[in-house]
Image (cartoon, rainbow, N blue to C red):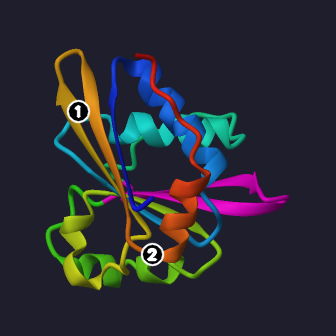
Amino acid sequence: MQHFKSHLHDEAGTAALGAALSRAITPGMAIYLHGDLGAGKTALTRALLHAAGHTGNVKSPTYTLSEPYSVKMEGRDVNVIHFDLYRMSSPEEFLDAGFREDFNGDNVCIVEWPEKAGSVLPPADLSIFLAVAGDGRDVELQASSALGLSCLERLKFAPNL
C-alpha cells in the first residue's frame, strides 16, 4: 500500500490516527505534514508522541523551529524531532540551523511546513496531507520510500464511521 485516505470525524479521530502511527513508524523516518493553519498537524504529532510514551507537554515549535523528544521505539531510545518551519524565510535558514544533520537514519523527523525548506530538505519517507472538512479532517498518507511503505503496511487504523 503506497497510499491511505480517510476522514477523521473529530479530534478523537486525529488522536487515534496519531496513536496508530506511533506503532507503525520506525527510527530513521522523515515524515512531512502538509495542511493549512489549523488543519491538525500539531495535534496529530502530539497524539503520536503521547502514544509513543512521551508524558510531558508537546508544544508547537513555531518559534523554536524544532523540539526534540526522547521515546522508546523498537526497544531502544529514539529521538523524535518535531520541526515547524512556518516562520523560516528561506531554505538557507534550515541549513544554517544545522537541522539537516538531524536526518541521520536514527531520529524520527516530523516536519510541519516542509515546503519552506525547499530542496535542502531530505526526501520524505511519508507525507501526510490534512485538510479541514466540516467538523473533521480529511487525511491522506503517501509513502515515498521503503520505510514509508513499510509504515503504511504496519498501520492499523480504522476510523470511526
* Residue 127 screen position, x and y as percent: 35, 59
Q: Which residues are magenta?
A: 64-84
Q: Residues within 10 Å of mark 1 (few under 14, many from 20)?
A: few
* Residue 81 screen position, x and y as percent: 53, 60
Q: Does the image show residue 68?
A: no
Q: Is residue 107 above or below residue 22?
A: below
Quadrant for the N terminus, please.
bottom left
Identify which amino acid the numbered label 1 is placed on.
Gly
Q: Is residue 103 above or below residue 44?
A: below
Which residue is situated farthest in the front direction here?
A: 1
* Residue 129 screen position, x and y as percent: 27, 48
Identify which amino acid the numbered label 2 is placed on.
Ser
Q: Is residue 87 above or below residue 159?
A: below
Q: Residues within 10 Å of mark 2 (few under 14, many from 20)?
A: some
Q: Quadrant of residue 112?
A: bottom left
Kindly identify which residue carries mark 1.
38
Q: Nearer the viewer, residue 49 or 124?
A: 124
- Judged by its main secondary structure, the magenta piece is strand
Q: Does the image show residue 134?
A: yes
Q: Nearer the viewer, residue 17 or 156?
A: 156
